[in-house]
Amino acid sequence: MGTADKIIRLIVAALFVALYFTDTVTGIASYILLALAAIFVLTSLVSFCPLYTIFGLRTCPAKK
């Protein structure tokens, strides 16, 4: 996972958490956003996204 991908995931996770705590999104959708935020943070910290391997995506520069 590339650096830009990690940063974007962390920003989106922060946005989801902000939407939850400001009660902009409520109900089931708020819990789904919190779960997605946790997944985004976790995948950013470990630099691995299982969906990327399934679909064959790479966002990090190729090693020489």
Image: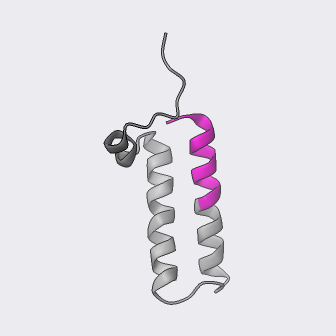
Judged from this view, the residue extending furthest toward the front is 55
Residue 3 belongs to the span the image colors magenta: yes
Q: Is residue 12 above or below residue 30?
A: above
- Pinpoint residue 7: horizontal percent, then vertical percent: 63, 45
Q: Main secondary structure of the magenta part?
A: helix
The one nearer the camera, 51 or 40, is 51
Q: Residue at x 57, y 52 (%)?
A: 9
- Pinpoint residue 13: horizontal percent, then vertical percent: 58, 61
Judged from this view, the residue extending furthest toward the left is 54
Q: Is residue 23 above or below residue 18?
A: below
Residue 6 belongs to the span the image colors magenta: yes
Q: Residue at x 50, y 54 (%)?
A: 41
Q: Is residue 63 above or below residue 23?
A: above
- Pinpoint residue 18: horizontal percent, then vertical percent: 65, 72
Span shown in magenta: 1-12
Query: Count the marks: how many?
Result: 0
